[in-house]
Image (cartoon, rainbow, N blue to C red):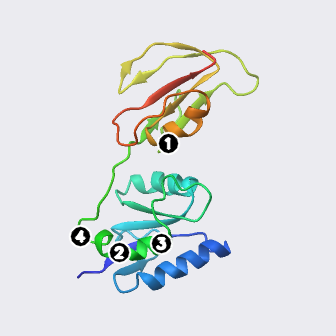
Amino acid sequence: MARSPVILLADRSLPHVNAIATTLESGLSEIVDFLPTGSDQATLAIAIGGDGTLINHGRALSTQGIPLIGVNSGRLGFLAKFDAQSLIEHRASIFTDDPPTMEVMLLEVTVDDNPPEIAMNEAMIAAGSPFRILELGLSINGIPAPTLHGDGIIVSTPIGSTAHNASVGGPIVDPTAQAFVLTPLAA
């Protein structure tokens, strides 16, 4: 069996993350070649952390097309499907030429003439201080959408629908749905 070239994304300055990274390096050593961060030879990446860590790394890796495996080390592990032991236990079915993957929707958000930003879970557009009513002219894939008036808007992917969007009363969407949510704020 060929060894999988993998990037391990871990903040080793945190003792509990360093311990998880060491466990993974030991438990996966016969099937994985760990490469330096930033290597263009990797076919997979493993990120150790909570959902915020996965979202940050997922956004960065999206332009490279490298699948990301999440190993939970924090409180929130909605996106991180494994702990270190379960990843080691299931290694033979994951580190293959055709690993099981789930594609997630990304957003590209552009405000005025600013460069576009990529969001894995959500983007919020709001006036900021001093707070005032905004007139939001929206377009989706270049097609004009209704103009909204209010404090702002949250645009979320299905994965992001359970975050800030849900806390302001927006709908929760199945993570596999090909949809996104527009939730006006005080419109």
The residue lying toward the viewer, choosing from 11 and 30, is: 30
Residue at figure coordinates x 70%, y 28% from the top left: 128
Counting residues from the start of the chain, the first of labels 1 and 2 encountered is 2
Q: Quadrant of residue 44?
A: bottom left
Measure how far apart labels 3 and 4 are at the Cα level.
Answer: 18 Å
Disc 3 on helix, strand or loop? Answer: strand
Determine which of the numbered discs, if any, sits on residue 97 in the image.
4
**Where does residue 42 sit, x and y in percent of width and height?**
36, 70
Seen from the viewer's position, the closer of residues 132 and 116 is: 132
Labels 4 and 1: the sequence-earlier one: 4
Mark 2 nearby-residue class (10 Å; few <14, some 14–19, many ≥20): some
Give the numbered dot on residue 91. Answer: 2
Count residues near mark 3 (Cα–Cα under 10 Å), then give few for <14, some for 14-19, many for 20+: many
Query: Spatial distance from mark 2 to mark 3, Cα to Cα?
Result: 15 Å
Q: Is residue 2 left or right of residue 18?
A: left
Q: Which residue is mark 3?
A: 8
The correct choice, above or below, for 167 with respect to 185 in the image is below
- Who comes first in sequence, dot 3 or dot 4? 3
Query: Which amino acid type is shown beneath numbered disc 2?
Result: Arg
User: Residue 121 got which mark?
Assistant: 1
Q: Mark on residue 45?
A: none
